[in-house]
Image (cartoon, rainbow, N blue to C red):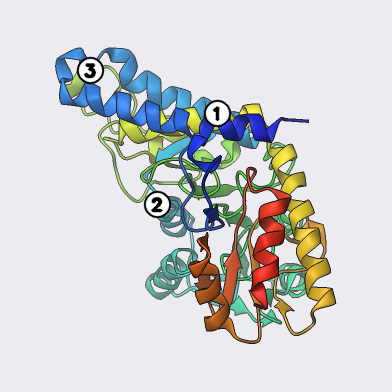
Amino acid sequence: MTDFQALQQREYPWMTDSDVIYLDHASTGAYPKATADAVTAYVSLRHMPHTLRPEHFFATLQRSRELVAQLIGASAAEIALTTNTSHGVNLAAFSIPLTTGDEILTVDREFPANALPWIKRAERTGATLVRLPCVNDVPDEAALLNAIATRPNVKVVAVSWVSFCSGARIDLDAVGTACRERGIWFVVDAIQGLGAVPLDVSKTPIDILASGAQKWLQSPWGSAFTYVRKERIAQLEPPTVGWMSTRGSDDLFNMLTYDPVWFEDARKFEIITLPFPDFSGMNASLALFQELGVANIAEHLASLGDRLVDFCDAHPEVRLVTPRDRPHRAGVFAIQPPELDATSARLKANRIFHSVRERCIRLSPHWYTTPAQWERVLSLVLG
């Protein structure tokens, strides 16, 4: 088992003597020290640009593609580097072929970044966006699978892997398999799951996956990526053109050929120039996650979730919005105590950093959240 305590002391020395309990990774992840050092070093080079070397540029980005690919079980050729999740969702929304009568299937209570691009795409093509109602504020997975099986005009299914407000986790294997059987495009916003739960796209059928790295992957703002399944890359026409997205554009000694033929890999979807310091930092964070082991993190978060389930069972006046079963939750936990505003204020007064979303208190711990800290949080929920 990974020694989380030793890694915490190495990467977050300020936590050792701090009374802060940081439970807001669903908003912003805390940099590890290695990441902060990498970003600082790169920015220092940027201050003296004559010290920059070729390896600081495109080699840094290629390393990012490789590390992301290792994280999700893809190949580096299937990874496009972007600056946020929205870039990848828009890529999917505006490049997947759609026409009048086609249906885009999603669930209600989606994060706006995974709803608005599809709303606009439907408006412009005559396609129909179908939002399936939630049950008790949680996506109805059975209804989603039934709609995939029975609605003949569905061309795209677009969902968040983990809900930003309820913490409910979609069974990507079940939904992806249903889509693959019918030739439906399956698009996933994975930002609230990657880093908290393992994912292997070589086994889980996903066509396009978009994720920022600034939350659970504890990386800089401006670092993000999109996975496009190899077989789908050639089927998509990028909605925007980057100056390094076409064949031969990486030859900086022969830049004026203007060859309009795309790269054959996912680089065709990239818009350069990317923020190199941010990706240098992301590389340091992803290297740490290899050391931690995402499966180890997932087990730790699942055990914290189990304790929260027990707490809510013992205190039925606290409604647990997040599903109780492990397979349908990740690291985002949503509760509704009887006096939400007072509870949130009490947590803040005790330096417990959290969020309030859709009239729920959202607690999002991570690998270094100790059981003792978690118990302290639960002891303050009811005063």
Give the amino acid at mark 2.
His
- Within 10 Å of the Cα at label 2, are there few (<14), some (14-19), or many (20+) other Cα atoms? many
| Pointer 3 or 2: first along the chain | 2
**Marking on residue 87:** 2
Q: Is residue 308 left or right of residue 194?
A: right
Q: Residue at x 54, y 54 (%)?
A: 22
- Within 10 Å of the Cα at label 1, are there few (<14), some (14-19), or many (20+) other Cα atoms? few
Q: Nearer the viewer, residue 32 or 200?
A: 32
Q: Nearer the viewer, mark 1 or mark 2?
A: 1
Between marks 1 and 2, how big is the CA–CA gap?
Answer: 34 Å
Between marks 1 and 3, how big is the CA–CA gap?
Answer: 40 Å
Give the amino acid at mark 1.
Arg
Q: Residue at x 21, y 29 (%)?
A: 258
Between marks 3 and 2, how big is the CA–CA gap?
Answer: 26 Å
Q: Residue at x 16, y 20 (%)?
A: 49
**Marking on residue 314:** none
Q: Residue at x 72, y 80 (%)?
A: 318
Give the amino acid at mark 3.
Leu
Depicted 229 relative to depicted 154: above or below: above
Q: Which residue is mark 3?
A: 252
Residue 124: which quarter of the image?
Answer: bottom left
Q: Residue 3: image x %, image y %?
A: 71, 30
- Within 10 Å of the Cα at label 3, are there few (<14), some (14-19), or many (20+) other Cα atoms? few
**Marking on residue 10:** 1
Q: Secondary structure at mark 2?
A: helix
